[in-house]
Amino acid sequence: MVQHNVGCKDQSGGNIDLARTLTVSPLQADASGVTLSIEAQETFEEDIARQTDTGCKLPPQPRQVSASHPGLKVEPGQWTSWTIVDKNPNLVYRVRAGLTSGAS
């Protein structure tokens, strides 16, 4: 939860609940890598300061983004990037996955 000073008296208000929800599901895994299905939902603030006609501060507006990747291939020991938003702000997920040997 983020709170901003707003209005002409610069008082607390304008709460925004910033949230991130990720669902990652492995689809396939072998020696060549792991394939993941990813569902992402983000809530963040716009980066533009807004004002009323009389110059009083307004709170930033929340921005919601949802994205889905049906099969992100991750090579063993390597980082893979998935860009959700390319500017204002730049939102990139970096993913790394691998296999471990099972218990004997």
Image (tube, helix red, strand yellow):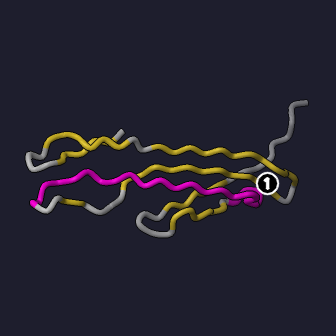
Residue located farthest toward the right when viewing the structure as drawn: 104
Q: Residue at x 23, y 60 (%)?
A: 50
Quadrant (top left/top right/bottom left/bottom right) for the N terminus: top left
| Residue type, mark 1 in image | Val
Majority secondary structure of magenta residues: strand
* Image quadrant in which you'd find residue 83: bottom right
Quadrant (top left/top right/bottom left/bottom right) for the C terminus: top right
Q: Position of residue 78 (x, y in %)?
A: 70, 60
Q: Residue at x 62, y 63 (%)?
A: 81
Q: Position of residue 22 (x, y in %)?
A: 60, 45
| Residue 74 seen in this snapshot | no
Q: What span is colored magenta in the figure?
A: 54-78
Q: Is residue 28 left or right of residue 2?
A: right
Label 1 SS: strand
Q: Is residue 56 left or right of residue 71?
A: left
Numbered disc total: 1
- Compared with residue 87, is residue 32 higher up or lower down, i.e. above or below? above
Q: Is residue 39 left or right of residue 21?
A: right
| Residue 101 seen in this snapshot | yes
Q: Is residue 44 left or right of residue 59?
A: right
Q: Residue at x 30, y 41 (%)?
A: 15
Q: Position of residue 23 (x, y in %)?
A: 65, 44
Q: Position of residue 102 (x, y in %)?
A: 86, 36
Residue located farthest toward the bottom when viewing the structure as drawn: 87
Q: Residue at x 41, y 66 (%)?
A: 88
Question: Is 25 covered by the magenta stretch?
Answer: no
Question: Is 55 covered by the magenta stretch?
Answer: yes
Q: According to the image, label 1 marks what residue?
A: 34
Q: Which sits in the foreground, 39 or 53?
A: 53
